[in-house]
Structure formats: C-alpha cells, structure tokens
Image (cartoon, rainbow, N blue to C red):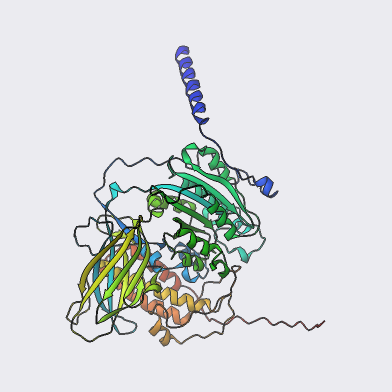
Amino acid sequence: MKRLLFLILIANVTLFAMTKKTDKNVIDDWEYNSTIESKDATRTMQNAGYTKGGVVAMSAPTPKSFRSVKKVGLAVGGAKDTNNFKANIEKGYLPKLDSITYEGQFYQHYFDTGLNGKSCKDLFCPSYSSAKRLNSFSDESEYFLSVGLNSGIEEGNFKRKKLNLVVVLDISGSMGSSFDAYHYDNMGNRVNNDKSDKHKKKMEIATESIVAMLSHLKDDDRLGIALFDHGAYKAKPLSLVGNSDKEAIREHILALTERGGTNWSAGYKEGLKLFEGINTSDPLYENRIIFLTDAMPNTGELSKNKLFGLAKNASEKNIHTTFVGVGVDFNNDLVEYVSKTKGANYFSVHSSSAFSKLLDEEFEYMVTPLVYDLELKLNSSNYAIEAVYGSPDANMATGQIMKVNTLFPSKNDGTATKGGIVLLKLKKIGEGSKNDIKLNVSYKDVNGKAFSNVQKVSFKNNNSYYYDNSGIEKAILVSDYVTIMKNWLIDTRAACNDDVKWIMQPTPAIMKRVMEYPPKRPLYPVVPTWEKRSCKLKVSAGYKKLFQAFKKIYVNEMNLIGDESLNMELDILNTLIGQKTSTLTPIKKNVDDWQFKN
C-alpha cells in the first residue's frame, strides 16, 4: 500500500513538473496596471465574482465529431436581438426607439424561407414568397414579397476564419452602475450589492461576458485588449492565443474596475492601434473589434473622426466591428446607425449567463460575415418597393432597389432559418393585368468576387387574400408588431426628457397611421446628449385600445401559424395592456430668471 502511494506521489510530481515546463512556453503579456492609472482601482478577484472553478477557461471548445447534413442559413447584419427593449419594459422603463428593430426581432424567430426543397449549392440562394392581405387597421389591400436567405454551405463543413480579435472595453464610471438601472438616475449613488445578474454592476457582467467569449478562441487566433475611460490604454497586445497565459489573462480581465469619464473615440482608436503591423488583407483571417460599452454616446460621435465614423472607415480596411451593449440604459439609437456599416452587428447583454449561452451556440456565426453588398433590383411596371422590413439598410430602398450591406451565417433547424428573411412591402403603381416581377440579385463574397441571380415571381391573379407559406405570414405579423411598438415609442418618448411641443393625435388617427413605417410624420426632436435619465413606462388610453385591438388580430394569426415562439411578442403586449393608463403631458421648459447684468 505504501509503495502504491509512493508511486502515485511520484507520478503527480512528474505531471506537475511537466505542466510547469509547458507553462514556460506561454507568457502573461498583460500591460494595463490599474494601480498606476488610478488609485481607486481596488476591486479584488473575490468581489469581481471570480472563483477558481467558477468561470470557463480560455480554451477552445471541443470540436463536434459528427458531420451535419443541415445547411447553414443567412441573416442580415445589424441588431441580433431586442433584449434591451424587453429588459426596459420588464424594469418599468420606457425603451429607446431603436431598442427594437425589425432585423433584431426577426432574429428571435425561425422562418420558412420558401426554398421548398429546391437545391442550393451556392454561397447565397435567394428564394421568394408572396402574399396579399387586407390590413385590419386601414382596410387596404397590401402586397408583400419575402426574400429567403439561404446558403448551400453544409453546417458540418462550415468553419470560421482565424481571428485577429481586439476587445475594446468601456471601464468608465457609468459601468459601475447596476445593470438594471439608469446611471444618470442615481449619479454617484452606490449600487445594490446583490450578486444576482439583475443587480450586478455592468462592469461585472461585461468582464464575465468577455471571459465567456474568449473561451471560444483557438490557439492560432490572435487576441488583443484595449480599455478606455476618459483616456485609453493598451491592456494586451494583439498576439497568438496559443502563446498567452490564459489563466493569467482571465484573472486580469475579471479584476478590472470602473472609474473616470468616457471617451469612446479614444477607446476605438486604441483598439485600431493594436492592428498595426498586422496584415489585415490576409484572406485566412477575419479582423474584428468587439466593443463592449453601456453605450451612451451623443450625436457628436457620428462625425467622421469620432466613434461611428472610425468604425465605418475601419470597415474599408477589412476591420469589422461588433458592438455589445451592457445595461438597460444602453443607447441603441446611435448604435443602430453603425450597424449599417459593412461587416457590423450588435448584441445587447441581458445577463452574463444568457450571453454565455448565446456564444456557445453562435460565436462562430457572429464573427464571420459571408456576403457583402447585396442588391436586389425589382423590375415591374405594376409594383414598386414601398418599405423594407428586416434590414438596417431599409432606408436605402429607392422604389426599385433594396440594399443590404452584410449577411452573416445563421442557424438552420432543417426546415427553417433563424432570422433568415427580409420582407418587402410593395405598392401597386400600375393597373395592368401582368403580375410578373423580375428580381435581379447581385452580391459579393468576402474575397470581393461578384455573383448574380435572376428569378421571376408573381402574385396570384384572383382577388383572394393569401400567404404563400407560414414564413411570409409570420414575417408580416412580426413586422406589424415592431411597427406598432416603434410608433408607440415615437409618440410616448416625445413627452420624456425632451423639450418638444406636445401633439397627441386622437385614437382614430393613431389607429389609421400606426401600421405605417417608416412613420408618416417626422420624429420628434430629442435631447442632444447621452446623459439621459430613465423615462417611466407609460401607455396612454389611445395606445392601450390599440394594443388590445392588435392583440386580437395577433392571437388569431399566431394560432393559424401554430408557432409558440410568437408568445414572446404576446407577453410584451399583455404587459403593456396591463399598465395603468397614463395621461401624457409635455415637460415644462425651465425658465432662465437670472437678472443681474454686468
């Protein structure tokens, strides 16, 4: 027995020695020292929520050992969720306008793309479905086409490129606020110490999300990290993951603490610096910045030399951006702007655990754009494009042309694709009997090679209302929901935080225009600053009646489609209907009563 114990001890010592020898081949190349930058950086590993075995290590996931026969689908860039919209309503706040987008809501669902068993062997195979319906709100006949986003790439054969990945993290003071509160509601107040996700600091959720993200990197990927508050700092140079001390880097990330002001542009520029000396034209690598922030930039960040202008310029140099918003006060309205940039997308972190689960399922998809510069030309003497739903580039539609900057790979369950659809609403401009529509699609792959596809589609000649399949029916229903929510937010936010002349139309007028998007009225002006306090969740009597009327239509359609995933929208409707009716009044303008003149 003693001999056996001795042999086990020797074996363990030998294994330990071998491990230590291997560890000498990796380095801790972390450069950021918070004690030098700020004396207030005192958060320890314990109050950062770290435990030795409690967080996944930065190692590559075990590869799947089976070959799938399913095909990868495609979905547009831009918003990949509407978590921020949902979280604000759950917490009793009025969401921001672009916290809910068509593409973001579509990406919560799987759609029959109308391929109907046809063979697809190309990178992108568009498919088309048509529908004609009577709008219950306007009593007008409406015509729709859906563009199904299909790919011939088999799921088992899909492999992302190697990554040059730079994480840029916001460590400003607002990141010390609670995830479920607005920072400017409680300036300087201490946050709840409850360590459940909903009361964690945004910094804690951000660092835990980064660690979860990095667990999906492989040894031949490169990783760099930049930080910013009122300044910007290189935390880790862009170097091979296989050469890094993964445990040490993980601990450094979890030990970060928040402080200081906010300079988004400086942070992004610091992230770009890490690419110096890297060949961003290497076809084997995808170059991507993942920018994590509670994102409250003002409109000044849209200028050429600021955050969003920098992101657009970087995309022209093959460096693409993923924005990850943390907290209920995440400003989607401006991030939606940059999501129109080539290769860009954004996510909202609802909780670190939910984000970790998302990464387990979709990390390789979120960092791998496949199709660029998609353009659809509609050739018809009787129809023109009136609206586009499901793309951040909707305003690029000109009547005959629809454009989409980027398509990313998306999950396909064998019969339907996650977010795999763009919906076109057509306007009948001619009285001819010919219903044929010629659709010419052109696009480029990631290497710049151009492709094109021409197909014809037609509406049924009879006067009946119909849907070609459940995919287009579901897309129309979801887009109706988003349109109503956007109109509600436009009207309701006009009396919140903003100095505007309040004009509220009576219920019949709302009912007539609420299904129109883009809206047939200008957006109300908003305060040109990021320092906004929260707005209390409000539902006027007119909108409550509208929600109740729409709910009846929605439930009927949901039952016909037979898709339980549509309950997520129904839950929001029920929450809003259950809100206490409010009377919306304008915010009074403060008077400058200073009388002294020097």
Q: State the quadrant of the C terminus.
A: bottom right
In the displayed structure image, the side of residue 469 where residue 25 appears, left or right: right
Residue 57 in view in this figure: no
Residue 283 locus on image (x, y percent): 38, 49
9 with respect to 45 (left or right): left
Quadrant that contains the N terminus: top left
Q: Quadrant of residue 219?
A: top left
The foreground one among 295 and 274 is: 274
Residue drawn at (51%, 23%) of the image: 17
Whether residue 249 can be seen here: yes
Rendered location of residue 182, percent (x, y): 58, 64
Q: Is residue 460 above or below residue 176?
A: below
Q: Position of residue 368 (x, y in %)?
A: 38, 53
Look at the picture and state if 458 lies above or below 301: below
> In the picture, residue 511 is in which quadrant?
bottom left
Judge by depth and name the residue closer to the eye, 425 or 491: 425
Would residue 174 be found to the left or right of residue 129 on screen?
right
Q: Residue at x 49, y 61 (%)?
A: 313
Of the pair 20 and 81, the residue shown nearer to us: 20
Q: Is residue 538 above or below residue 28?
A: below
Residue 410 screen position, x and y as percent: 34, 56
> Which residue lies at the image location 40% right of the left edge and 69% below the top edge?
393
Total of numbered circles in the picture?
Answer: 0
Q: Choose top left, top right, bottom left or bottom right for residue 109.
A: bottom left
